Amino acid sequence: MKTTSDQYAEIDRDREEYGVKHSEQLGWAVMRHADVMQVLLDWQTFSSVVSNRLSVPAGMDPPAHTPFRKIIEPYFSPARVAEFEPSCRQLAHSLVKKMLERSEHAEIVGEFARPFAAHAQCDYLGWPNYMEEGLHRWGVRNRKAIREQNRETLVKSAEVFEYLIAEMLDDRRRERSGPDRDLTSRLMFEQVNDRQIKDEEIVSILRNWTAGEIGTIAAAVGIIAHFLAAHPDMQELLRSDFSKLPYAIDEILRITAPLTTNRRVTTRAVNLGGHEIGAKERITILWAGANRDPRVFEDPVNFRWDRDTTKNLLYGAGIHVCPGAPLARMELIVATEELLAQTKSLRFNPERPPVPAEFPDGGFASVPLMTERA
């Protein structure tokens, strides 16, 4: 398996040599910004219905996609995210404090990033604390199956998640919970096309939120911590002015994508990046390729303060642009603020170098750091 540095370097090379490249593993891999935008904006040709398994709404095209998207977007409204921010900050503060109290040797991914992502997700959706461990085990198993392209394990993993969610829905019905109990309960009362939303649709929505939110947030926190350790001057700048964090975080994650791929399938013959591609062909978007494309981002692998942020595809574009982006941005800002506020310095541990993730995971499997408490 390729390490993080290997996979990003290879994507950079392939983007410049091929732009669009075919392989057995990925189908047609799309790496240049303009080609990725063509895929994202033309849902009629590049369908998101890539699996027989129900995927709401990420694996849908209009018109089926539209009513579900309309339901989901208010769950990430500015008001709802702002209401959750104090709880999220308390969680981040507590996890960082415990991590620093244990030792000056901190492993950011395992001790902070993953617990933070899982606990925040459970809190936001109103899930019991015992779900955290189940979600962690499910995530580890699911990521391993994706790396190994083990379809049997992926099916079993999906079934495990469906069982966990179905139990929670049953508990709420037995308790006759109303829609104001939490966001999961509210989802159970939604209407789609003048009918009650189905349990399998609720499970699919929550599976998409959970798989996307937990894995990507955990990877992003690890990437940010790694970047800060590599750039002590940036640590000092951001500690002195947290208002710079929103831009800085998006730029850091443009350079090192926490989410590496997204899938589509062609509905008809199309020319993409100079290649004639037939109908029913697999398309894999490589976000790292598009977000490091020198045609759009000058000096793309280095941090700059003068980027056109509208070109950054960190949260996608088109009809499937990430609805949870407001929540993700808030969580990443809070996590980074707490990590910086409670430390004087973050630096690499010479005896324990960072361990890059294996494709298709982004970021790092572990980020051991030496920390100095503030």
Image (spheres, rainbow, N blue to C red):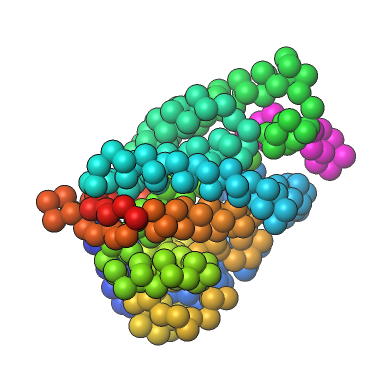
Q: Is residue 5 above or below residue 34?
A: above
Tell me if 338 is positioned left or right of 82 in this view.
left
| Front position in the image: 362 or 226 | 226
> Which residue corresponds to the image point at 82% horizontal and 38% vertical from the top-left?
191
* Residue 280 vertical placement versus 212 (above, below): below
Q: Residue at x 16, y 50 (%)?
A: 352
Q: Is residue 68 above or below residue 39?
A: above
| Residue 200 point in image, percent of width and height | 66, 31
Q: Is residue 139 magenta?
A: no
State the residue lying farthest toward the front: 374
Relative placement, left or right, of 31 versus 325 is left
Comparing 298 with 12, the one in front is: 298
- The spot of residue 175 in percent (x, y) is 73, 16
Q: Position of residue 113 (x, y in %)?
A: 40, 46
Q: Residue at x 23, y 53 (%)?
A: 370
Where are the magenta residues, as a range? Answer: 188-203
User: Can see residue 236?
Assistant: yes
